Image (cartoon, grey):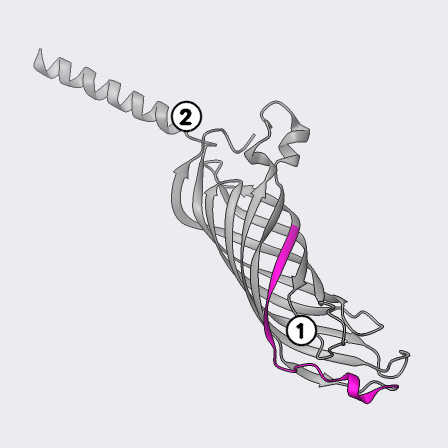
Amino acid sequence: MVKLIAKITLILSLCTTSFLAKAQIGYDYAQYDIGTAVGLNTAVMADVNTLRIAPSIHFNFNYNQSPYVNYVLELQVGRLEGGDSVKSSSGRQFENHFTSFLFRAQLQAGEFIDYSASPFMNVMKNWYVSTGVGYIANHIVAKSLDKRNPAYAVGDNNAQTLFIPARLGYEFKIYNDYNQPSVKIDIGYQYNFVFSDNLDGYSTQASNKDAYAQLTIGVKFAIGGVTSYRKQIHY
């Protein structure tokens, strides 16, 4: 009789465990990601007449409070360029080799919309907005004088300052056999409001601030800390 009860208890335990394991498929996610990205940068608010595109590479670590609420710590190394010393009316042209660090919070639509019954909303759930604070160290390696006013190039060639990133993007989630998002392809547009006028090495008498924009594509990999979400992630 004791052996029979023990067998029944074991069978029930295994069935319960199996049921719970299956029930969690689609609800679990990793709390930590690491990733890398490449960017195309443009100094959209600078003291030059011509915009140029220059590259950067990014490395990031992500803490996922939920699948759709993320905190991103990122390092960027790249270039900013602008102007044309020959063709532009001012003759101003610069090249900035920068390093930046930023921390931003990211909110995806899936956190607050119901995507369980709509293929369209299931696609829309991965759109996100993000903002935070950043620190950029500029190093101007090349700069031409103003044709009309050589004294115009009075900016700091090695300036450090804070900036505010404002980002809009989309995250393509790739799921593993347990329907957990294990790989993410991230495409985003980021506008950075800089707290100084030294991004380009030129400084005006007015209180104008510089800004630069970035178009990025990157990949993130889940690295652990699996936990459960309140609703199914994958449909």
- Asked whether 160 falls inside the magenta stretch, the response is yes
Q: Which of marks 1 and 2 is in front?
A: 1
Taking the spot 61% from the left edge, 77% from the top edge, the residue there is 159
* Residue 84, quarter of the rendered image: bottom right
Q: Give the range drawn in magenta.
A: 148-167
Residue at disc 2, secondary structure: helix
| Residue 124 place in picture, x, y as percent | 66, 35
How far is disc 1 from disc 2 in space, using C-alphas? 49 Å
Residue at disc 1, secondary structure: strand
Marking on residue 170: none
Image quadrant where one finds the C terminus: top right
* Neighbourhood count class around disc 2 (C-alpha, 10 Å): few under 14, some 14–19, many 20 upward: few
Q: Is residue 159 above or below residue 182?
A: below
Q: Do the residues labelled 1 and 2 touch (CB within 8 Å)?
A: no
Q: Is residue 147 above or below residue 214?
A: below
* Residue 40, quarter of the rendered image: bottom right
| Residue 206 place in picture, x, y as percent | 76, 72
Taking the spot 53% from the left edge, 53% from the top edge, the residue there is 220
Amino acid identity at mark 2: Ala
Is residue 6 left or right of 139 when viewed as pictured? Answer: left
In the displayed image of the protein, which residue is found farthest to the left? Answer: 2
Quick one: label 1 or label 2, which is nearer the N terminus? 2
Counting labels gives 2
Taking the spot 43% from the left edge, 44% from the top edge, the residue there is 30
Amino acid identity at mark 1: Arg
Image quadrant where one finds the N terminus: top left
Taking the spot 87% from the left edge, 86% from the top edge, the residue there is 147
Marking on residue 23: 2
Marking on residue 79: 1
- Asked whether 165 falls inside the magenta stretch, the response is yes
